[in-house]
Image (spheres, grey):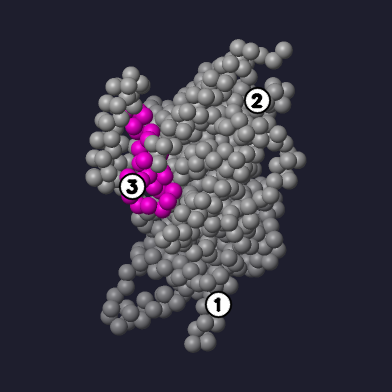
């Protein structure tokens, strides 16, 4: 038993430090087993080599502590030139461009020694490098024992807006610290010369540091789609882009970072907040109250705004009988204006201390936040839609991973002219808010793909965009935010780490719960809707519209979800009606107060 444990540990260490050597060892063991089976008349299928070796590798990496030993390809791409070919890396990334298609690849190669005529097989599934061939050996491409397979290639980037706590590397080995400890051996190649290429136009947030790589998926079956977020473990090397191949001069083609994926998994709540036990029955309410108290405190004690902000953070678009439900964009009104000379110019960073304060709070709670200041130069000079009109899919600002929180700051919007590009950009954002679709522009047609993005608009007055819900902040909240500056924000007592992790886990888990609306509750809502309309008509008041009903149902749905309930309850419906009544009264009072203040400006 001890010998077996020692062998497993040695194999894990070898896989981390010299993965191709570990793969060669596993392949030789497999060939010996296959030869024994063939001698016994049991037959052998050479095309099973790839699958068997992959299963062995996945088993080794599933051992406790194995993944944590692998260096992480971080969010910054400035270290790519220091990574040695043949090393094993982890990469948390988003699929930006899956259109690189399939490659035909020599997975098992029959080699022949040009001097002696000796032959042997090598497993080359996870490498494109010719330097693995020893001197005197060459591939016998005419051999029937060669095994060709197909693999999918995608361009992947660091997840845009990924907050620091949600990145790989906090509990794991950081790449810069681990590079000097790697023992790659003869498989390594010094890459201190030419820098690998990263295409800045393929990252949604131009000018922001990021890593990128061509990821080659060798497994048959599931391949991640555009904007999917995945954790990849694979062998790092350089490769030519499949879109560049076919030219006459290979030397002029770029050297692209490449990861041969041994395994990949979706990024989930358990990978974002690992090791934290799931809340049991009854604990969702405690987590909900904890989140509400925290959000209320950072909004200057505005309990109503805290409720709506929490519902917004829990929203997710789902299809129910081909109808999209669950989206809940929110406009919080009452933030102090930013003077024109303070507004950022052409950057995706918030300069208003009040909006930056809210963005910083949310960055501690949700995995991904992207800031979009509505400064004219930024809106007019950026491209919000992804486009392949040049032949290669270039990213747009809105080509973002599922569940990304988009924080729009309208407090820096001043008089000026939106050009055609700026208008198209705002329309693209409006389409995301209303329809949860994003247009991918191609040379001869455009394709609308479904998104799942949350949009929070922070403004002084009502937003120029149409949102699902708008709420004027309370007077105390407006005064609190007006006093926010970098010094006061730094002095604010932060949430303790344990409670922070509990809220993070709560948000991720309940947002992705399966949810349904019982028939009896649906019937009760229809009856009450009709009764409310009759009552309003009799009193001569404004009657509830279908849009009003849809909003209340969405709020009720999110209230139930916030309690960890899998079904819409009548209690949540009544709570939603009360909450919407409070919001309507608050907004009406705020509008009257603003009208009076505008008619009687201070002298």
The dominant secondary structure in magenta is helix
Q: Are marks 1 and 2 in contact (CB under 8 Å)?
A: no
Residue 246 on the magenta segment: no
In the rendered image, the residue lying farthest to the front is 539
Q: Is residue 141 above or below residue 99?
A: below
The residue indicated by pointer 3 is: 569
Q: Is residue 186 above or below residue 521?
A: below
* Distance in Å between CA atoms under marks 1 and 3: 52 Å
Question: In percent of the image, x 32 and y 69: which residue is there?
Answer: 45
Q: Secondary structure under badge 3?
A: loop
**Horizontal side of residue 431 vs 133, given as left or right:** left
Q: Any mark on residue 337, and which?
A: 2
The residue stretch that appears in magenta:
546-574
The residue indicated by pointer 1 is: 9
Q: Nearer the viewer, residue 427 or 183?
A: 427
Question: In percent of the image, x 43 and y 32: which residue is there?
Answer: 581
Picture coordinates of residue 118, whole percent (x, y): 47, 72
Picture coordinates of residue 283, whole percent (x, y): 46, 59
Q: Is residue 472 above or below residue 184?
A: above
Picture coordinates of residue 465, whole percent (x, y): 49, 25
**Horizontal side of residue 308 vs 460, given as left or right:** left
Quadrant for the C terminus, please: top right
Asked if residue 499 shows in the view, the reply is: yes
Asked if residue 234 shows in the view, the reply is: no
């Amino acid at each position: 038993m001890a010998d077996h444990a020692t062998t497993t540990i040695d194999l894990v260490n070898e896989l981390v430090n010299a993965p191709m050597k570990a793969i060669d060892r596993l392949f030789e063991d497999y060939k010996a087993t296959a030869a024994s089976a063939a001698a016994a008349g049991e037959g052998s299928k050479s095309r099973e080599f790839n699958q068997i070796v992959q299963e062995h590798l996945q088993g080794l990496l599933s051992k406790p502590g194995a993944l944590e030993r692998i260096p992480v390809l971080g969010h910054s791409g400035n270290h790519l030139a220091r990574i040695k070919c043949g090393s094993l890396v982890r990469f948390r990334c988003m699929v930006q461009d899956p259109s690189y298609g399939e490659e035909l690849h020599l997975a098992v190669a029959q080699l022949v020694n040009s001097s002696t005529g000796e032959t042997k097989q090598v497993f080359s599934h996870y490498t494109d490098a010719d330097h693995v061939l020893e001197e005197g050996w060459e591939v016998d491409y005419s051999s029937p024992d060669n095994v060709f397979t197909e693999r999918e290639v995608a361009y992947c980037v660091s997840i845009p807006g990924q907050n620091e706590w949600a990145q790989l590397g906090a509990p794991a080995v950081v790449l810069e610290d681990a590079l000097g400890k790697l023992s790659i051996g003869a498989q390594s190649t010094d890459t201190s010369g030419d820098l690998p290429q990263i295409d800045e136009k393929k990252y949604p947030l131009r000018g922001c540091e990021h890593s990128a790589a061509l990821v080659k998926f060798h497994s048959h079956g599931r391949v991640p789609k555009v904007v999917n977020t995945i954790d990849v473990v694979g062998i790092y090397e350089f490769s030519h882009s499949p879109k560049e191949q076919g030219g006459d001069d290979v030397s002029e083609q770029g050297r692209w970072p490449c990861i041969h994926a041994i395994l990949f998994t979706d990024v989930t709540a358990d990978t974002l907040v690992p090791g934290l036990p799931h809340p049991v029955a009854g604990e969702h309410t405690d987590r909900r109250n904890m989140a509400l108290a925290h959000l209320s405190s950072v909004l200057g004690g505005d309990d109503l705004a805290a409720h709506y902000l929490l519902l917004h953070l829990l929203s997710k678009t789902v299809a129910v009988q081909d109808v999209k439900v669950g989206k809940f964009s929110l406009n919080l009104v009452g933030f102090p204006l930013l003077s024109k000379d303070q507004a950022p110019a052409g950057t995706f960073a918030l300069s208003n201390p009040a909006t930056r304060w809210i963005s910083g709070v949310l960055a501690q709670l949700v995995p991904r936040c992207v800031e979009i200041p509505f400064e004219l130069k930024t809106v007019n000079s950026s491209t919000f839609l992804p486009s392949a009109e040049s032949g290669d899919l270039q990213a747009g600002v809105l080509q973002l991973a599922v569940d990304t929180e988009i924080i729009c700051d309208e407090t820096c919007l001043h008089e000026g002219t939106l050009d055609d590009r700026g208008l198209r950009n705002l329309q693209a954002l409006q389409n995301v808010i209303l329809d949860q679709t994003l247009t991918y522009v191609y040379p001869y047609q455009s394709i609308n793909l479904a998104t799942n993005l949350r949009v929070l608009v922070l403004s002084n007055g009502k937003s120029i965009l149409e949102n699902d819900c708008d709420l004027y902040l309370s007077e105390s909240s407006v005064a609190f935010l007006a006093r926010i500056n970098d010094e006061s924000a730094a002095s604010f007592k932060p949430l303790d780490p344990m409670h922070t992790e509990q809220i993070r886990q709560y948000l991720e888990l309940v947002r992705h719960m399966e949810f349904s609306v019982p028939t009896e509750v649906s019937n009760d809502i229809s009856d009450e809707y009709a009764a409310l309309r009759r009552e309003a008509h009799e009193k001569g008041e404004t009657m509830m519209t279908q849009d009003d009903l849809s909003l209340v149902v969405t709020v009720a749905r999110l209230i139930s979800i916030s309690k960890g309930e899998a079904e819409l309850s009548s209690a949540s419906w009544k709570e939603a009606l009360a909450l919407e009544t409070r919001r309507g009264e608050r907004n009406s009072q705020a509008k009257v107060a603003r009208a009076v203040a505008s008619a009687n400006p201070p002298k």
